Image (cartoon, grey):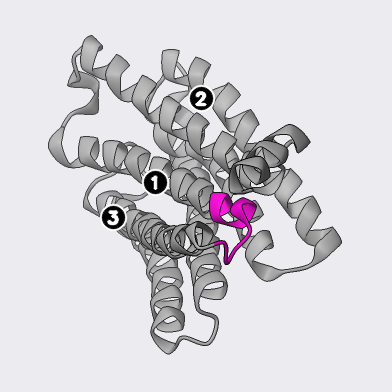
Amino acid sequence: MLALGLGVPVSLLLAVVGLRVLKRARRRGGLPDRMVGIFFLSLAVGAIPALLAGDPAVVPPALGRPAMAFGHAVLSVGFSALYVFVWRCFGPRSSWRRALALAGVAALALLWVVQGLTEHFLPPGGAVVRATGLTRALALSWAFAESLRYRWMMQRRARLGLTDPVVANRFLLWSLWTGCLLAASVVVVGTRFLVADLEAIAPGTHLLIVFSVTGFALTSGLSLWLAFFPPPGYLLRLRSRGD
């Protein structure tokens, strides 16, 4: 129940961020913004049923399989959007980025089908769920690497006065939100690989996992909020540092 108690407010925050980004994308246009909005909204909707479908205190056993199938389907839609976001944002004309994005989307769709055929969406899942987790982690790793590369480029330009410090800071925030979600993904995927029986996890270890994933997700959501919806005082402080 602790995981659910912490997961609900985190999911609400991610949902608010996702809806706000989608609203901004609808007003201003732009495929990358829409993909980010879909990604965060999918995390908000799919994470709890996907991760907690096997917890009878959260999901009744009779609903475990439907919750598992629904949660992983929604998450795969979100991570497919993340693959497309990285491609379209950091290299829309790059053939290798397009190929990687399309391969990631195809792999997530195929893995969901295979999960249903071989594991029948029985929580907590087995090898297919772990492979899916790695495919999602690849999307986050790619997003983090691209954001970090642009952060370094913008930082050098900002020191020379060649770019707006607000733009340079935005890529720092992008590195932070992608990096924190990558860290959360490493914790979740690592737990599935290292622990055969999730119910056998010691209470102290379980608390550490829950609080670390929650903290990473909260930091990611807040960083994305600052990147897309920075308060006026925050922008003023950034520009004053650049003067």
Disc 2 marks which residue? 7
- Residue 12 against residue 203 in the figure, above or below: below
Q: Secondary structure at mark 1?
A: helix
Residue linked to disc 3: 134
Choose between 102 and 60: the one closer to the eye.
Answer: 102
Q: Find disc 1 in the rendering and name its residue.
A: 179
Residue type, mark 1 in image? Gly
Circle 2 — which element?
A: helix
Q: Where residue 113 sits: x, y (%)?
A: 41, 63
Tell me where the magenta segment starts and ends, as one range. 161-170
Is 165 magenta? The answer is yes
Which residue corresponds to the image point at 68% horizontal and 69% vertical from the top-left?
Answer: 31
Asked whether 229 or 43 is in front, the reply is 229
The number of numbered discs placed on residues in the rendered structure image is: 3
Of the numbered discs 3 and 1, the one sitting upstream in the chain is 3
**Picture layout, residue 56 above or below residue 130:** above
Q: Residue at x 67, y 46 (%)?
A: 239
Q: Is residue 2 above or below residue 34?
A: above
Between label 2 and label 1, give the one nearer the viewer.
1
